[in-house]
Amino acid sequence: MSKKQHLFKKKSGWSLDERDPKFIESLMPLLGFLYQYYFQVKTSGWENISPKEKVLFVGSHNGGLAAPDMTMMMYDWFRRFGVEQPIYGLMHPKVWQVSLPMAQLAAKAGAIAAHPKMAYTALREASLLVYPGGAEDVFRPHYLRNKIYFAGRKGFIKLALRANVPIVPVISWGAHDTLIVLADFYKIVQQLHEWGMPWLLGIDPEVFPIYLGLPWGLAIGPLPNIPLPVPIYTQVCPPIVFERYGTEAASDRHYVNECYELVVNQMQQELDSLVQRTAKLNTR
């Protein structure tokens, strides 16, 4: 590998310049087919935001590594505001470790490494999409499908406070049925690892689920999956504006906890409402 190639790989995910509107435009027909026919997405609430105002979109996602509700959210932005209107999304740094080619393609669509430095940089330029629950959220068991689950992670609150931007919750329902997660055996497998069993690919995951889905049928571990064609419902909620902003507010642990509980509770109420509306639509 040449020195230039090595430097390129090292930098992938750590620059906003990798985003390529022409590449995104080339994906729009496929994404549009998935949006309209495969997932039959129903979305509401885009009137709550302006593309010219920088906000921190905060979502709770489903469906394993495919995370179709996240992809459909990005497509919704592009089709409404155009591919030239930038938005970035945080992606776990481990993706660059496991599959650099896939990560580089995601970077061309606006993905950046999930690191505070990159998050602040992105918010100075445009809006940013984050999913604080990470792997524990996207692989949460099916019985938790109606629960907002961030695993206690509050970094996104500190980010919003320091960057002085409102939080716009994005909730989704339906994508949990594109992959049926039965349980998470991470604690058991972690114990086996401590006894000498190596991790798959040499990388310590955050979850170790057992699930039903394509193409494996019954699968164990955070493997890539093909989402089932299940309708997805998404709601872009009104912005949440906090009383205080700035470094001092972000350093106040009690205030950060208050803001975190406010966001989680409000998102849970919105999700409960979305589930009820969806149930009524499906019974007609």
Image (cartoon, rainbow, N blue to C red):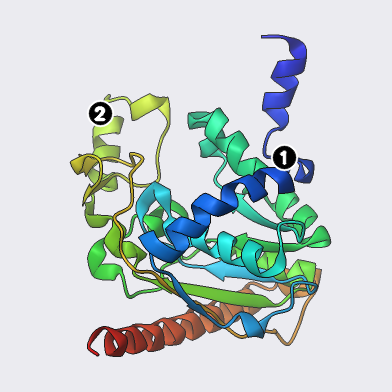
Q: Amino acid at mark 1?
A: Trp
Direction top: furthest residue: 1
Q: Which mark is residue 195?
A: 2
- Using the image, determine if residue 258 lies above or below residue 8: below
Residue mark closest to the camera, 2 vs 1: 1
Q: Position of residue 210 (x, y in %)?
A: 21, 47
Q: Nearer the viewer, residue 65 or 22?
A: 22
Mark 2 lies on a secondary structure that is loop
Q: Nearer the viewer, residue 187 or 203?
A: 203
- Residue at 35% x, 47% y: name it: 207
Mark 2 vs 1: CB contact within 8 A: no
Q: Is residue 190 left or right of residue 28?
A: left
- Residue at 52% x, 68% y: name it: 59
- Residue at 39% x, 89% y: name it: 273
Res. 90 visible in picture: yes
Q: Amino acid at mark 2?
A: Trp
**Mark before the other along the chain sequence, 2 or 1:** 1
Quick one: quadrant of the C terminus?
bottom left
Q: Position of residue 167 (x, y in %)?
A: 65, 75
The quadrant in which residue 1 appears is top right
Q: Position of residue 109 (x, y in %)?
A: 64, 47
Query: Which residue position holds label 1?
Result: 14
Structural distance between the alpha carbons of marks 2 and 1? 36 Å
Bin the neighbour count of mark 1 within 10 Å (Cα to Cα): few under 14, some 14-19, many 20 and up: some
Q: Nearer the viewer, residue 10 or 71?
A: 71
Res. 111 visible in picture: no
Mark 1 lies on a secondary structure that is loop
Q: Is residue 11 left or right of residue 269?
A: right
- Residue at 83% x, 60% y: name it: 124
